[in-house]
Image: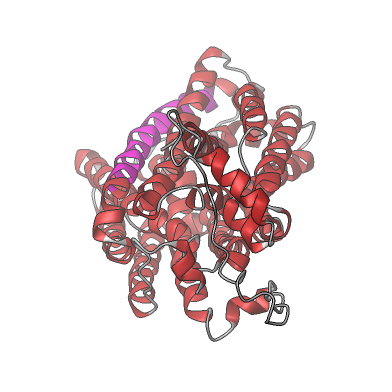
Amino acid sequence: MTGMQWRIWGLAAAGKFFEGFVVFMTGVAMPLFALQFQMTPIQHGLVGAASLAGILVGAVGLGHMADLFGRKLMFIAEMVIFVIFLMLLAAAPSLPWLIFFLFGLGIALGCDYPTAHLVISESIPSRLRGRMVLSAFGFQSVGALAGTAVGATVLVLDPTIEAWRWMFASAIPLGLVVVAGRFTVTESAHWLMLQQRVELAEKAAARLLDRHPRYPKKIKLKHKHRAAAATMPAPVPPERSIKALFSPKAIRATVLASVPWFLQDLSTYGIGIFTPTVLTVILGSHGASSAHHVSDIIANALPAARGAAAIDALLIVGIIAAVMLADRVGRIPLQILGFIGCAAGLLIASFSADYSGPVQTTLIFIGFMLFNFMTNMGPNAQTYLIAGEVFPTHIRGLGAGFAASFAKIGAVMTAFLFPILLADLGTKLLLYILVGASIAGALVTWFFRIETNGVNLEEIDH
């Protein structure tokens, strides 16, 4: 690993950190939004779903641009968009603007889904690709924990209705540093070769692999079609539309990359964003909806935020397990095992509705902690990894972006409907539905399995 490879990895990891930070901090800030803007239940759902809807649009709307304009350009552009909307969000004057700015943040984060994966996977040796991609992705969990912790800290330091502005503004300085850093990375040699820009690709590879003492001393990239170029007609430009993802050669990869990720996001974002709400309902606290003063909001929010932080810590343990096992066990076995473990955790949590007191508290914490560990060891990590590996280079950004976008349909549905369903169906039935989604995810993974462990990206292309 050279210095440039580590730099690319770190700057990609920062993008995943910001996603967890913003999305999960929204859950902590929600009671303050509700009090300041006098939100209705539907508006609660809109705020919770806004950034996720933006991710949905950004992943497929901007993600494929990395195939057209290059990995580096979009790697920079998405972070510039993120910082601009983060500044606007911290100064949002009204609820409609708040929702719009959260949506704009989501667009930038959605673009980062395929782009961050591509810049790492196309810069890292195949034997390290799984652990390096997943360790960067793991910073989503670090961000989730940091977002919850920063939100709780700001509530203590600034117990006012405007405290949410400082929560989001706290990420701006780091965002500016990441923008500056992304200007310094090299373009993907894979992408440059696909554009027939061989000399630039060799320079990019040389810069990527620069070390002291220099090794290799000279880089010459082999173009598979160079020898035959004089005698063969010009190749037909590859199909780069959504239609290409549903061709006979790609449909299996598209289903594997998209459907399990959709089913996983139904549970992960519902449990993640609304863990404080679920804890409030199950543990019998006074909900934020019944509080009408800032002091009451903070009194309710802090215990729930602390409980959510304890549960979210298992996300980090889970991603560590994924990093250690992905290149040894394989993507498919871990995804299937993880889905089954998620179902078990949610089932344990559902039993808490039949008890009260310490038993109820123990069941909900054990269930949610098991869910968080298994989802990050399995489907939350592996779906991201698989989506960036199973498509050929010319549609890798498009395919990974489509899969992330399709998955976020599930996240948006959950974020918008979760508060409504929690009130209408109750905790137990809602958790049963999520158990079924996890079991379905395991089945789809098995029937459409494609193992990419140890396979280099050129083999995937051909």
- Please, which residue is most extreme toward the bottom here? 248
Residue 300, image x, y percentages:
46, 29
**Magenta part of the chain:** 296-321
Relative side of 448 to 101, left or right: left
Between 105 and 231, the one nearer to me in the picture: 231
- Give me the residue at 54% from left, 61% from top: 222
Answer yes or no: is residue 293 visible: no
Residue 400, image x, y percentages:
56, 62
Between 282 and 79, the one nearer to me in the picture: 79
Give the mark count: 0
Between 139 and 77, the one nearer to me in the picture: 77
In terms of image quadrants, where is residue 183? top right
- Give me the residue at 63% from left, 64% from top: 398
Answer yes or no: is residue 83 visible: yes
Residue 165, image x, y percentages:
66, 25
What secondary structure is the magenta-colored segment mainly? helix
Q: Is residue 52 above or below residue 3?
A: below
- Please, which residue is most extreme toward the top here? 157
Q: Is residue 53 above or below residue 170?
A: below
- Give me the residue at 40% from left, 28% from top: 303
